[in-house]
Image: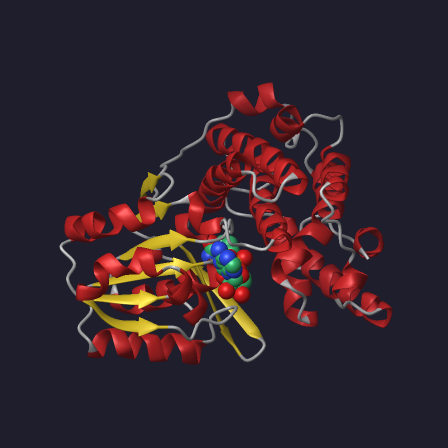
Amino acid sequence: MNSDDARMQRFTVSLRGPRTVYGQGVAASELSTELNLLGASRVVLFASERERKAREAVIEPILGRTVGHVSNVRRHVPVAVAREATDLARRLEADCLVSLGGGSTVGTAKAVALETGLPIIALPTTYAGSDFTPVYGLSDGGAKRTGRSDLVLPRTVLLDPTLTWTLPLDLTKYSAINALAHCVSGVFADGRSPITDLLAAEGARLLARGLRDVADSAEDRAAQACLTQGSYLAGTVLAHAGTSAHHTICHILGGAFDLPHAETHAAVLPAATAFLQEQQPGSAEPLMLALGGPDLAATLAGLFAEVGAAPRLRDLGLAHVDVQRATELLTDRGLHGDIPGLSEARASQLLAEAW
Ligand code: NAD
């Protein structure tokens, strides 16, 4: 289906996101005001020790109404960590959760909001985009489960690009690629519409521009602003369109072989996009118009190489002996309909391209 055909189709969309205040310095200047708007006086702050020390100016205005602090922030939000934080918020009779950090930090606050219904004010420090979604994830042992609930969608986001200025360059690039992956996955997703395609296209354009510019000059503030606004659009695409085979593949590989989250997106995205383009010819068109080039997979591979963020799965810890097992895992999910159209031969080809 080309984009004109897609535009003829019926769709339903209900865009809903957090109240978002964007600007340099808004984290420090607007947090008290936003707490007042929610009528909040007993805050539990979610931030790693590092964030808390580094962001004294942000936290200082709300210290008087901060009753507790959760610094035990871990990747994939282990259920034990979530339970401990929920108990703390209940014991302290908190009326608001403030998250200052990346996807793992707001993920921990979301786990508490899911149980308590408390509102979240989020101050993102990376480009992961989780602050704009009603999606949560919890891990127990090796298993990770995700779900959706309006309870976990932050009420307010203070989107302050200065909070990302301290990200090391590698983290900046991979976090931006993680956001770009939301835009790419979104145009192939079941929940996509011409409206989410528009958000994905503009998000991808901002993210690609920001990536190129930070790769040239790590302290390019305009580039970091592009990445910050791109992450907002990417998170909004994820929230409304959902994801597609790319995310399923990253989830399977990351879970089974303990691969790093953001880098795995960079390694898999071009190969997964090539597969998705075969399955849904035409769906990539909005992104091709935004990013240029006749083939989205090749454009992405070229962009990642240009900015020095093109790892292979073998660089991330997937041993050659594990590739066969990975092929079986992907094929199995293909057979069960989780990755429609993925045969064993195609899974093997996809992994060969990404490995
Ligand atoms: P993260 O929160 O795990 O942070 C990565 C590292 O960067 C940490 O060591 C952190 O301390 C550090 N860091 C964060 N901000 C920094 C800054 N400004 N300066 C210096 N260091 C900083 O990483 P992430 O990529 O933000 O989040 C990844 C997690 O988010 C994954 O678990 C992923 O599954 C989840 N996620 C969820 C959604 C959703 O909608 N639920 C969307 C995207 C990602």
Residue 210 as seen in the image, left or right of residue 158: right
Q: In the displayed structure, would residue 309 be above or below residue 315?
A: above
Residue 216 as seen in the image, left or right of residue 33: right
Residue found at x 55% / y 46%: 179
Q: x%, y% of residue 97?
A: 28, 62
* Residue 56 sits in quarter: bottom left
Query: What colour-coding does the image apply?
Result: secondary structure
Residue found at x 55% / y 36%: 223
Residue found at x 72% / y 52%: 268
* Residue in front for this viewpoint, 221 or 41: 221
Quadrant into which the C terminus falls: bottom right
Residue found at x 49% / y 52%: 126
- Count the numbered circles shown: 0
* Residue in front for this viewpoint, 157 or 286: 157
Q: In the displayed structure, would residue 59 be above or below residue 21?
A: below
Q: x%, y% of residue 160?
A: 39, 45
* Residue 149 sits in quarter: bottom left
